[in-house]
Amino acid sequence: MKQGEIVDRVVTYVVKEIVDDADAVEVEIVADGQDAVVAEVRTAKPDMGRVIGRRGRVARAIRTVAGAAGDEEGVAVDVEFLD
């Protein structure tokens, strides 16, 4: 299993459940040092607001879930939402 695979699956699932255009969701896991990964999330433009949520609440929740998935793998996780 490659580093960040559980994080990738969890973040992809959660984001696809939130957006209208699930086919446009892309999650890329990038190594950020030996024990850290960054999940780069891209969605269709109209869906980005849904993923971030009011005052960033949904984004914060996604980061929390991703962090828990990272704990399973023993890696630190950061989630970035990209246009």
Image (cartoon, grey):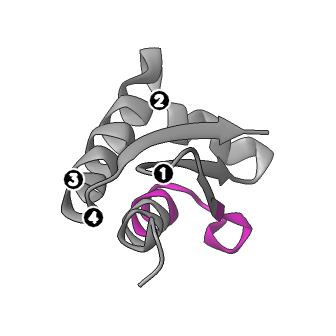
Looking at the picture, how far across and down is residue 36, in whole percent? 45, 46
Task: Return the residue at label 1.
Answer: 34
Q: Which residues are magenta?
A: 13-27
Q: Are marks 4 and 3 in contact (CB under 8 Å)?
A: yes
- The foreground one among 9 and 73 is 73
Front residue of this view, candidates 80 and 46: 80
Which residue is tagged 4?
A: 73
Which is in the foreground here, disc 1 or disc 4? 1
Q: Residue furthest top?
A: 55
Mark 1, other Cα within 10 Å: few <14 / some 14–19 / many ≥20 = few
Position of residue 70 in the picture relative to residue 3 (left or right)? left
Q: Which residue is mark 3?
A: 71
Residue 81, above or below 47: above
Q: Which mark is residue 53?
A: 2
Whether residue 15 is in magenta: the answer is: yes
**Structural distance between the alpha carbons of marks 4 and 3:** 5 Å
The image quadrant of residue 55 is top left
User: Mark 2 or mark 1, which is nearer to you?
Assistant: 1
Of circles 3 and 2, which is in front?
Answer: 3
Q: Residue at x 73, y 66 (%)?
A: 24
Location of the N terminus by quadrant is bottom left
Mark nearest the camera among 2 and 4 is 4
- Give how far apart the Cα atoms at labels 1 and 3 are: 14 Å
Instruction: Please report contact status of discs 2 and 1: CB closer than 8 Å, yes or no.
Output: no
For marks 2 and 4 on the same chain, the one whose residue lies earlier in the sequence: 2
Q: CA distance from mark 2 to mark 1?
A: 31 Å
- Secondary structure, mark 3, is helix
Q: Position of residue 6 (x, y in %)?
A: 36, 71
Q: Main secondary structure of the magenta part?
A: helix
